[in-house]
Amino acid sequence: MIGGMASSTLLTLIVIPVIYDLVKGWGLPRESAADPRQAKSSDLRLHGGRTAAE
């Protein structure tokens, strides 16, 4: 009975979070913050031909 309580505590507090972190890292690769496909605010044109920076 004591061994079961100790093993369930170790599983809950240590093993399960470690497995979660390992599996979480297997996901799709993240895109970089400087995505070349995203338009800059100066490239965006507002109605009337002005840029967003003006």
Image: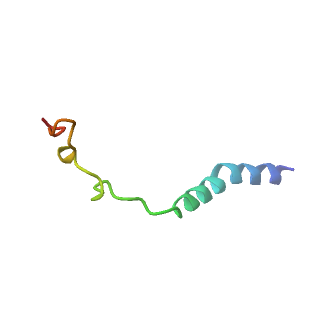
Instruction: Report the residue at 30% width, 58% height from top.
Output: 37
- Residue sitting at 59 percent across and 57 percent down? 18
Judging depth in this view, the residue of 33 and 38 nearest the camera is: 38
Residue closest to the eye, 7 or 26? 26
Q: Is residue 22 above or below residue 12?
A: below
Residue 28: % across, % down: 49, 62
In the figure, is residue 40 to the left or right of 14? left
Q: Give 41 or 31, whichever is nearer the viewer.
A: 41
Q: Looking at the image, how many numbered discs can be counted on the residues?
A: 0
User: In this picture, is 51 found above or below 33?
Assistant: above
| Percent coordinates x, y for residue 8 in the rendering | 76, 51
Percent coordinates x, y for residue 6 in the rendering: 76, 51
Which image quarter is the C terminus in? top left
Quadrant assignment, res 33 = bottom left
Horizontally, is 42 left or right of 3 in the view? left
| Residue 36, image quadrant | bottom left
Between 45 and 3, which is closer to the camera in this rendering?
A: 45
- Say which residue appears at 83% left-offset and 50% top-offset: 2
Q: What residue is at 72 percent from the left and 48 percent from the top? A: 9
* Residue 1 picture location, percent across and down: 87, 50
